Image (spheres, helix red, strand yellow):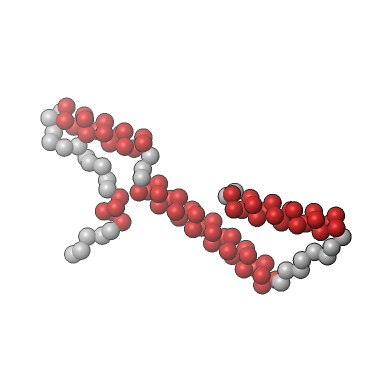
Amino acid sequence: MSVAGLKKQFHKATQNVSEKVGGAEGTKLDDDFTEVEKKMDTTARAVMDIITKTTEYLQPNPATRAKMSMMNSMSRMRGQEKGPGYAQTEAILMPLPH
């Protein structure tokens, strides 16, 4: 759970406790509001997932970089001009004009 989601849950719990202790009537939420709130939470999770996956795609993990470096070194040792080369993900994302 994200920090924002954790804060939201904490504030909801705090409000609920203060309503129970103070004897105040709880806030009545409209069904449309509750539905929109769920949609917003789902959208926020999807956006964060996309941002995380895009970052991982554009900046691969160090193990992948090490593997590509080792393959380039082995190619040079065998006398080949170049190894398979490191895939530039920016080029994959932007198709070349025909």
Instruction: Say if 94 sits above or below 59 in the image.
Output: below
Q: On the rendered structure, is 23 left or right of 58?
A: right
Instruction: Say if 69 sits above or below 16 in the image.
Output: above
Q: Which residue is located at x 70 percent, y 55 percent? A: 11
Instruction: Say if 78 sits above or below 16 in the image.
Output: above
Residue nearest the observer in this picture, 78 or 22: 22
Q: Which residue is located at x 67 percent, y 67 percent? A: 34
Q: On the rendered structure, is 40 left or right of 62?
A: right
The image quadrant that residue 64 belongs to is top left
Instruction: Say if 78 sits above or below 96 in the image.
Output: above
Can you give x and y, in whole percent of width and height, for residue 40 in the image? 58, 64
The image quadrant that residue 96 belongs to is bottom left
Can you give x and y, in whole percent of width and height, for residue 26 in the image? 80, 64
Q: Which residue is located at x 37 percent, y 48 percent? A: 57
> How many marks overall?
0
Q: Which residue is located at x 62 percent, y 68 percent? A: 36
